[in-house]
Amino acid sequence: MKLNWRVWKNPWRLMLVVNVAVLVGVFLHKVALPPYVPYIHLLVDYHFGFTKRALIGAAIGLFSAKVPVWLVFALGGTVWLITLGLFAKLFRKTFGFDDKHLPLFTLMAGSPFFLKNFMHTLGHFDIYGCALAICLLLLPARSVAYVALAALFSIILVLIHHIHLLMYVPTIAVIVILRHYLVQGLTRQNVAVGVAALVLCGALFVAVQLYGTTAAPRDEFIRYLQSRMTDPSQTTLLSFAYIWYQPLSKEILDTWHRLPSNILGIPVFALLIWLHIPLWRYFAGLIGGLASQAHRRIVIAALSMVTAGYLVMFAIVFDYSRWISNWAVCLFLILHAVKMLPASRDTALIPGDDRNTTIFGWIITLIPRVGIVRPF
């Protein structure tokens, strides 16, 4: 009874409860939809040689020759739960779970850009970048091994899906810069490892673009994918097989062809970003409160770099709702990295008793997700 009263008395606690209910609804809606692209991604492996977007399928092939449709939800749900646990641990490490930080946690964890949208895109590979970036925020960053580990994570992400080079690899680079290089300084060893990491990731991305397209005839490729399906008669689940034959130039052409209709969602994206204004004000306060002016400039440059990567993605691939959501998640993660830097003053917390902030919190809580291509 006492716990229930505390929940009802504090609107931010109640928002968390409502967010859980919304997440359940998003999951049930997701299960009711046919899992087109996420399923075929679990079927493709390296059977025909080096292939883009094939690492997860190859890993599954080590344990099972057949891939059931339910594995999309089992694997995606497991990764989602791991990401939730990692983020909760990160927030506790950076801020702590108390009432004064509850609005900050609610605006992040309950954001339609974050966990709720990852639930909607269950089976897509965006969340792997988020999970690995959180791991780097949790691990100690004193040794050059930290830079090497970040490079390994980046290589894995590019092999999972080459779009990660623009989606989460820049954020991983920012985390490494803020947590290792700004604290430990530049040495011959960590600079060499960092440069090698950039060269390897760039070379791998070029290799994926040039040599990752499937060389096998399409009919043979489809037959092989069917051989890995538990129910080969569900040929509609293979309708996106063209992705493995499509060059970058065709992806760009498709994106610009859809641009006139997809660009109509930009005002909605702008509104969703504006609804997070209490969070952005807090982030700006953190940056302004950094002890070093050089650190402030580096953080602003880093945010510009990450944003530029997403602008390039907007011009290449048309999954706009996914990109804007992951961009916001990247900012959430960089916020934690900035909080770990030395500060000259305390930053004013998000006021939990402010009426406007509470309204923003409720609106964000009730929005179930952003979507994949168009808003909602």
Image: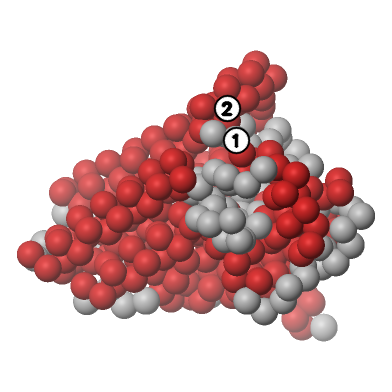
Answer with left or right where residue 356 lies relative to residue 285.
right
Quadrant occupied by the N terminus: bottom right
Spatial CA distance of label 1 from label 2 is 6 Å
Up the image or down, 277 lies above or below 46; here it is above
Mark carried by residue 339: none
For this rendering, which residue is in front, 244 or 149?
244
Circle 1 SS class: loop
Could you classify mark 2 by the number of other residues whose Cα lies within 10 Å: few (under 14), some (14-19), or many (20 or more)? some
Q: Quadrant of residue 228?
A: bottom right
Answer with left or right where residue 331 lies relative to residue 339.
right
Q: Residue at x 54, y 53 (%)?
A: 51
Kindly check if marks 1 and 2 are in contact, taking CB atoms under 8 A apart as contact.
Answer: yes
Q: Position of residue 103 (x, y in %)?
A: 57, 60
**Residue reaching furthest to the left:** 188
Answer with left or right where residue 329 lies relative to residue 229.
left
Q: Residue at x 16, y 54 (%)?
A: 292
Camera sees residue 265: yes
Q: Position of residue 307 (x, y in %)?
A: 41, 38
Q: Residue at x 44, y 71 (%)?
A: 135
Q: Residue at x 61, y 32 (%)?
A: 318
Give amino acid for label 2: Lys
Q: Position of residue 104 (x, y in %)?
A: 53, 59
The residue to which callout 1 is attached is 246
For this rendering, which residue is in front, 221 or 156?
221
Counting the numbered discs, the total is: 2
Give amino acid for label 1: Gln
Could you classify mark 1 by the number of other residues whose Cα lies within 10 Å: few (under 14), some (14-19), or many (20 or more)? few
For this rendering, which residue is in front, 276 or 41?
41
The residue to which callout 2 is attached is 250
Camera sees residue 14: no
Quadrant occupied by the C terminus: top right
Q: Position of residue 193 (x, y in %)?
A: 20, 64
